[in-house]
Image (cartoon, rainbow, N blue to C red):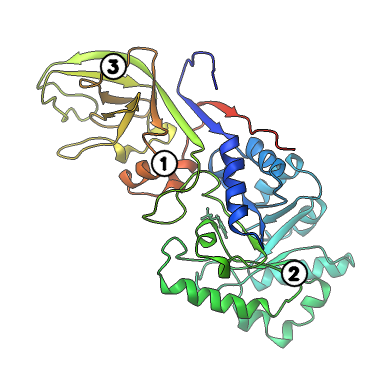
């Protein structure tokens, strides 16, 4: 891709990388349908561009977190694509979901009752999913609830199109909870044998075929995050973030840089100031402080460490050793092939999910198109 010179920090999202990640995940699950999780604006990468690109890559089922996200997604997709709402049915909103072709993931008996009542009233079994709680203790039904004979009539008004559960420790392949949840889910799905069964998130796909059932629903792996802890990342990088150098200056030995005034230069230093800060989702924790190193940015593959604190709108980095060195107007890599989202996440004591979903709203955004495979 070539673009006109950027005038500001620029986030580039490679839609071809997302499409190829989708194809790689789908190929890992030959017997299951591969859905896509596009909640939180497709993990910060932009649902309006990403969801249609996934649909063109043959994805037919999409998951979002909230009703509002579902309403935003519906007009972006073909009518025949299915949309599920993880957070379920907000009180009194059954008609709004049904009329927009949205399917709640029912995770509480009160929701099941409300949905069943709505279906009865309209004499139509509007499709929905059931979420079984197999150990997360967050959302989801436990057997004592849905298997209670007193609730049997609820499932004559509709029957779930999909049954799902969620792995708590999928990214840690040896964790005993994985097999326990698998075993539990295998039993629970028997209660609704006609429903599509879905357990695996990105990490679950890599736990092997036992975990694939009829459908898998990756999120982070589509967006280039490493799906399994401490392994080489098989996914293509999706998000590339570049900041612009606003100013280069020499700061003499002993002088401070930035807020707090306590990062003193150990030598005469060349400092570049960049147009990205914590208001853009660059975590303040990545800054350098008294006795601790900060993260780095990269210029032509060379890492340049942060100096001082991260400001709201600015970063300062040490380019003394860079050769060639960036100059005013040059773009430096904040996230890219040298600084991956997973590496940046571990430096910020967080996970790639949070790095992506905190990407700021001020960046110029640039979408590289997916290849047309039709
Ligand atoms: C977000 C989410 C996913 C996707 O998980 P990844 O780890 O990003 O693949 C799947 N299922 C549920 C219930 C989720 O909330």
Q: Residue at x 45, y 49 (%)?
A: 226
Q: Farthest bottom residue?
A: 149
Residue 184 position in % (x across, y down): 56, 78
Which residue position holds label 2?
160
Check mark 3 vs ligand 1: CB closer than 8 Å? yes or no: no
The image quarter containing residue 197 is bottom right
Q: Nearer the viewer, residue 336 or 346?
A: 336
Please determine whether, in this image, residue 228 is positioned above or below residue 159. above
The C terminus sits in image quarter: top right
Question: Dot 1 lies on which element?
Answer: helix
Please determine whether, in this image, residue 190 is positioned above or below residue 210. below
Residue 22 position in % (x across, y down): 61, 47
The N terminus sits in image quarter: top right
The numbered disc on residue 325 is 3
Residue 196 visible to an observer of this rendering? yes
Q: Nearer the viewer, residue 173 or 72?
A: 173
Is the Cβ of the residue at disc 1 closer than 8 Å to that at disc 2?
no
Q: Residue at x 51, y 71 (%)?
A: 137
The numbered disc on residue 109 is none
Of the residues under marks 3 and 2, which one precedes in the sequence?
A: 2
Circle 1 crowding by C-alpha within 10 Å: few under 14, some 14–19, many from 20: many
Which residue position holds label 1?
341
């Amino acid at each position: 891709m070539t673009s006109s010179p950027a005038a500001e920090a620029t986030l580039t999202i490679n839609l071809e990388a997302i499409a190829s990640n989708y194809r790689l995940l789908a190929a890992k699950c030959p017997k299951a349908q591969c859905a896509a999780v596009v909640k939180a604006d497709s993990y910060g990468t932009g649902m309006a561009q990403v969801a249609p690109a996934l649909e063109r890559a043959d994805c037919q089922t999409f998951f979002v977190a909230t009703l509002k996200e579902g309403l935003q997604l519906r007009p972006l997709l073909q009518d025949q694509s299915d949309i599920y709402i993880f957070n379920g049915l907000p009180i009194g909103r059954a008609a709004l979901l049904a009329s927009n072709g949205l399917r709640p993931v029912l995770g509480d008996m009160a929701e099941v009752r409300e949905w069943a009542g709505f279906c009865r009233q309209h004499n139509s079994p509007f499709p929905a999913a059931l979420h079984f709680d197999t150990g997360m203790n967050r959302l989801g039904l436990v057997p004592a609830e849905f298997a209670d004979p007193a609730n049997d009539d609820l499932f004559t008004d509709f029957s779930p199109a999909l049954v799902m559960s969620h792995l708590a420790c999928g990214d840690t392949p040896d964790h005993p909870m994985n097999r326990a949840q698998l075993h539990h889910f295998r039993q629970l799905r028997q209660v609704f044998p006609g429903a599509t069964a879905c357990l695996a998130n990105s990490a679950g796909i890599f736990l092997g075929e036992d975990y694939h059932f009829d459908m898998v629903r990756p999120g982070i792996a589509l967006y280039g995050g490493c799906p399994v802890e401490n392994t080489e990342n098989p996914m293509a990088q999706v998000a590339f973030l570049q900041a612009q150098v606003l100013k280069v200056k020499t700061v003499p030995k002993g002088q401070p840089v930035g807020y707090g005034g306590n990062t003193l230069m150990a030598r005469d230093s060349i400092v570049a100031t960049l147009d990205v800060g914590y208001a853009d989702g660059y975590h303040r924790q990545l800054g350098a402080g008294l006795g601790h190193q900060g993260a780095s940015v990269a210029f032509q593959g060379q890492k340049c460490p942060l100096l001082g604190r991260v400001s709201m709108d600015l970063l300062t980095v040490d380019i003394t050793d860079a050769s060639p060195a960036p100059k005013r107007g040059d773009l430096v890599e904040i996230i890219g092939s040298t600084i991956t989202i997973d590496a940046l996440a571990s430096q910020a004591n967080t996970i790639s999910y949070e790095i992506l979903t905190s990407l700021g709203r001020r960046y110029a955004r640039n979408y590289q198109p997916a290849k047309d495979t039709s």
